[in-house]
């Protein structure tokens, strides 16, 4: 239900998805207590997939924009948009090019909530094409064509590409694609 509560409310440096904000606040006391007790000056890297990506982004924003706590990097996989343009601009100005947002071809979650609803992504996007190759040099038009071809190729598969491409594991899921990219394949 967290995903479907899409109203924008005041957040750190702009408006954010109310469902994601509430979900983070429900666990924030434990996260903050853990960080204060265990961090001891160590680097902090935050990551998440899907709803976890939204919460990882919210936690990073809370740490950096509200508490002025250092976060060394943010890596999200299959994450939805979580805030408006003001939030996106403040996040980008503070965090520069340290956040990376991975998109797996036709993953529908990466396209919701929509821009027409006032939402924007944060972070530098990294795109896995329909073959699982990591690309960051594709134009918007190239991505649309790649998604279309991937959807056509998967039309007779067991699940639609826009659902299958959201998988963390499985054939051409985020983990397999990351392993292939790390191995240079």
Image (spheres, rainbow, N blue to C red):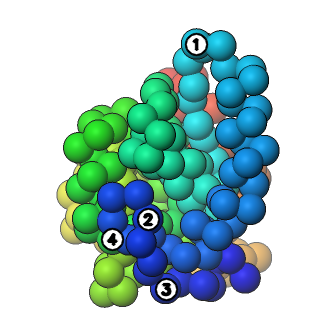
Q: Earlier in the sequence, mark 1 or mark 2?
A: 2
Q: Which residue is mark 2?
A: 11
For mark 4, does the 10 Å Cα neighbourhood hold few (<14), some (14 to 19), or many (20 or more) residues? Answer: many
Q: Residue at x 48, y 61 (%)?
A: 105
Q: Residue 101 placed where, x, y %? A: 44, 48
For this view, does 59 lie left or right of residue 118? right
Q: Which residue is mark 1?
A: 41
Q: Any mark on residue 7, and which?
A: 3
Q: Is residue 111 visible?
A: no
For mark 2, does the 10 Å Cα neighbourhood hold few (<14), some (14 to 19), or many (20 or more) residues? Answer: some
Q: Earlier in the sequence, mark 3 or mark 1?
A: 3
Mark whose residue sits in front, 4 or 1? 1
Q: CA distance from mark 2 to mark 3?
A: 12 Å
**Helix or strand or loop: what does disc 2 sit on?**
strand
Mark whose residue sits in front, 4 or 2? 2
Q: CA distance from mark 3 to mark 1?
A: 36 Å
Residue 143: quadrant of the picture = bottom left
Q: CA distance from mark 3 to mark 4?
A: 11 Å
**Helix or strand or loop: what does disc 4 sit on?**
loop
> Mark 4 touching mark 2, by CB under 8 A?
no
For mark 3, does the 10 Å Cα neighbourhood hold few (<14), some (14 to 19), or many (20 or more) residues? Answer: few
Q: CA distance from mark 4 to mark 2?
A: 10 Å
């Amino acid at each position: 239900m967290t995903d479907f509560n899409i109203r924008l409310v005041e957040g750190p440096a702009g408006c954010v998805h109310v469902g994601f904000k509430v979900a983070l606040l429900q666990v924030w006391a434990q996260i903050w207590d853990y960080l204060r007790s265990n961090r001891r000056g160590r680097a902090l890297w935050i990551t998440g997939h899907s709803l976890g990506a939204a919460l990882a982004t919210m936690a990073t924003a809370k740490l950096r924009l509200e508490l002025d706590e250092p976060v060394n990097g943010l890596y999200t996989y299959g994450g939805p948009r979580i805030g408006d343009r003001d939030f996106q601009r403040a996040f980008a100005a503070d965090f520069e090019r340290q956040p990376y947002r991975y998109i797996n071809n036709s993953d529908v979650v990466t396209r919701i909530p929509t821009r027409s609803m006032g939402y924007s992504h944060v972070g530098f996007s990294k795109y896995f094409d329909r073959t699982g190759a990591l690309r960051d040099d594709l134009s918007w038009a190239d991505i649309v064509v790649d998604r279309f071809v991937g959807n056509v190729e998967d039309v007779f598969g067991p699940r639609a590409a826009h659902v299958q491409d959201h998988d963390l594991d499985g054939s051409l899921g985020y983990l397999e694609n990351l392993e292939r990219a790390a191995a240079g394949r």
